[in-house]
Structure formats: structure tokens, C-alpha cells
Amino acid sequence: MPRLASGDSIERKRVTDLVVYLLGHYDQGLLEFKVDILKELNNVVKTKNHQNMEPNLLDCLVLHTIIVDEEKAKAIAESTTRSKELHERMNKLRRKGKLKEYKEIKLEMLNEVKQADAIGVDLSKSGKYNNEVIKEILAIYFSILKEQMSDQTTNQQSPLMKSVFLGIP
């Protein structure tokens, strides 16, 4: 990561391309890795001179999409609906005094809830990483803006400012 601000343009370009490539992937399994990359990128942006960085370094951050597994979200919604239906059936059977059928439906409902909880844990984990990614992206943007505001004495603008202004909205 420190080589993002290298004086060697070939080396700087290769490292920038690698960072853009890694951050541009939409893979659920890479979310934790993306957070680590963004933390390191934030450290480099805070400590190194922006004038030596490639202007397209932050372009991939604008393209970040929040990853949500739609199939899992649908499965939780269906499971919730199914649990409500089973709960209503249980209440009717209990009122009618059909305890044997009541117990069978109760077991079925408990299994349904366990399955939904397992899926929900996975979704909440990816949501947590998505929040971390967004937090790190904003930290990078605001550290660049802060540095630009403190360096108003020199009329040099950071080459990363274009990406910041495109990414903040």
C-alpha cells in the first residue's frame, strides 16, 4: 500500500490497478478483506503525498455496491410468513383442544424459526461488513477533504479530489 505514492510511475500504476481490481469485486467472501484494504488505503491517504498517487485510485470506491443476498432475504421473508401461519394454526388447535396436532405444528414452527435464524445471522454478518466498507470509504473521502482544506496555502489540488466529489453523493 505505501507504494501507491511511489515516485516510480510503473510501480505506482501496478499497485493502483491491483487495489482497484480487488476493491471492484462483488464477492461476499471478500468483504472482510475489502475492509482491511480500505483501512490500509485510508492510512496511506492520510500519511502520503497525494500528488504522487494515480488520479483513478479512488474511482472504484464510487462503484461499491452493497451486497445483499436476495435469495436469503426472500427465504427469511417466506419463513416469517410461514411461522405466522403456523402460529395462527397452533392457536386455533389449542382452542379446539387438539393438543397432539398442536404439538406437531409447534415442532414444525420451531424448526422454521431455527432455519430463519441461521440465515439471518449470515445476512447480518454481510450487513456488518457492508457498514464497515461504507465507513472506511467515507473516512478516506473526508481525510482527503480535510488535508485539502489544511493545504490551502499551496494552490495544488489533490489528484484524488475528482473521485472524492464523485463518490460522496
Image (spheres, grey):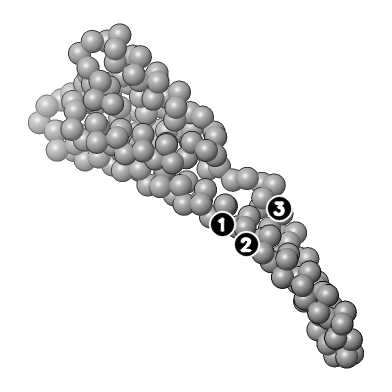
Mark positioned earlier in the residue sequence (3 or 2): 3
Q: Residue at x 22, y 17 (%)?
A: 6
Q: Which mark is residue 117?
A: 2
Q: Residue at coordinates 67% horizontally, 50% vertically from top-left?
A: 72
- SS of the residue under disc 3: helix
Foreground mark, 3 or 2?
2
Q: Position of residue 16 (x, y in %)?
A: 35, 20
Structural distance between the alpha carbons of marks 1 and 2: 6 Å
Residue occupying image coordinates x 73% and y 66%: 111
Q: Is residue 145 above or below residue 4?
A: below
The residue at 51%/52% (across/down) is: 125
Image quadrant where residue 108 sits: bottom right
Image location (x, y in percent) of residue 137: 37, 40
> Is residue 137 visible from the viewing direction of this image?
no
Q: Report the residue marked by disc 1.
A: 121
Q: Secondary structure at mark 2?
A: helix
Q: Amino acid at mark 3?
A: Lys
Q: Are marks 1 and 2 in contact (CB under 8 Å)?
A: yes
Instruction: Tell me: 133 left or right of 107.
Output: left
Q: CA distance from mark 3 to mark 2?
A: 13 Å
Q: How many marks?
A: 3
Q: Earlier in the sequence, mark 3 or mark 1?
A: 3
- Secondary structure beneath dot 1 equals helix
Quadrant for the C terminus in the image: top left
Locate residue 86, reporting x and y percent: 80, 73
- Res 115 → quadrant: bottom right
* Residue type marked 2: Asp
Q: Which numbered circle lies on residue 74?
A: 3
Disc 1 residue type (three-letter): Val
User: Which of the two residues, 87 or 16, is positioned nearer the viewer here?
Assistant: 87
Residue 83 percent location from the top left of the image? 75, 69
